[in-house]
Amino acid sequence: MVPAGQVWEDARTLWAFQLMGHDERPCSVAVGLGSHDLGVADASVELYRRGLVPLIVFTGATSDTTREVMPRGEAVHYRERARELGVPGEALLTETQARNTGENVTFTRTLLSEAGVAVESVVFVSKPYEERRAYATARKLWPGVEVTCHSAAVGFEEYLERIGDSRKVISMLVGAVQRLLVYPERGFMIEMAVPARVRTAYQRLCDAGYTSRLVTGA
C-alpha cells in the first residue's frame, strides 16, 4: 500500500505536468470541452469577457460521470451557465454529440465550418488536468490552426475541495497520463514527451489502485 503522503505527492506531480502554461492571447474561438466540471464554462466565459475571443463553442454529450449531474448534456449545461453569466446567445454555439476529446475536436471543426466561421486560432478550455490531452488531440486532428490551452486558475488542493471527490480526481489524473502514453500509436493524438518522474508517479498511483479511468487494451 502506498502511504497517503506519497499518493498526494504523486498526484501533485501529475497535476503540475498537465498544465501547459500557455500565454493567453486573442483567438478566433474558445472551445469549452464538456465534462462534469462547470468551471470549464466559467473559464471560457472569462476569456470572452476579457475580449480574448468573440465566440465560444461548448462541446459534449453525456458520459458515465456526467449523466446524473448534467442530464441535458454537457454542452447544454455549459451554455446555460454562460447565459446565466451574461454571455449573449449569438456568441455561443453548442455541439451536443461528442463523447470523447477526438469527437470534441472533429465535431467542433465541422460545426464552425458549416457556420461559416473563419478559424485561424483556437483556445481549448478544459479541466486543468486535461490540457495536454486537449493540445495533443487538437494538433493531430485540426492541423493548420494555432492551438493554445486554458483552464481555470485553481490549485490542486482547491480543486479537490471544489469537486469533493479526491479519488475521482486522482483517478482521472492517472487516466489522462495513460492516454498520453497510448493514444499516439492509435492515431488519436500527437506524441508528447512524458518525463520519467511523471511516469514513476503514474505507475505508483496505478499500483495504489487509482485505475478506474484507465482505457482497456493498453
Image (cartoon, helix red, strand yellow):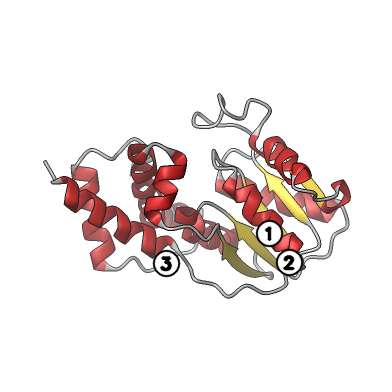
Question: Tag on residue 209?
Answer: none
- Residue depicted at x 37% and y 63%: 16
Q: Quick check: 151 left or right of 76?
A: left
* In the depicted structure, whether residue 81 falls above or below residue 20: above
Q: Amino acid at mark 1?
A: Glu
Q: Label 3 belongs to which residue?
A: 192
Q: Label 2 belongs to which residue?
A: 50
Residue 4: percent from left, percent from top: 18, 46
Residue 171: percent from left, percent from top: 34, 42
Q: Label 1 belongs to which residue?
A: 46
Q: Are marks 2 and 1 in contact (CB under 8 Å)?
A: yes
Label 2 SS: loop
Q: Amino acid at mark 3?
A: Met
Q: Look at the image and tell me in which quarter the C terminus lies.
A: top left
- Real-space Cα distance between discs 3 and 1? 28 Å
Residue 122: percent from left, percent from top: 68, 64
Q: Quick check: 172 left or right of 202?
A: right
Of label 3 and label 1, which has the lower sequence position? 1
- Residue depicted at x 24% and y 65%: 197
Of label 3 and label 2, which has the lower sequence position? 2
- Real-space Cα distance between discs 3 and 2? 31 Å
- Residue depicted at x 73% and y 54%: 109
- Residue depicted at x 43% and y 53%: 183
* In the depicted structure, whether residue 2 falls above or below residue 96: below
Q: Are marks 3 and 2 in contact (CB under 8 Å)?
A: no
Label 1 SS: helix
Q: Amino acid at mark 2?
A: Arg
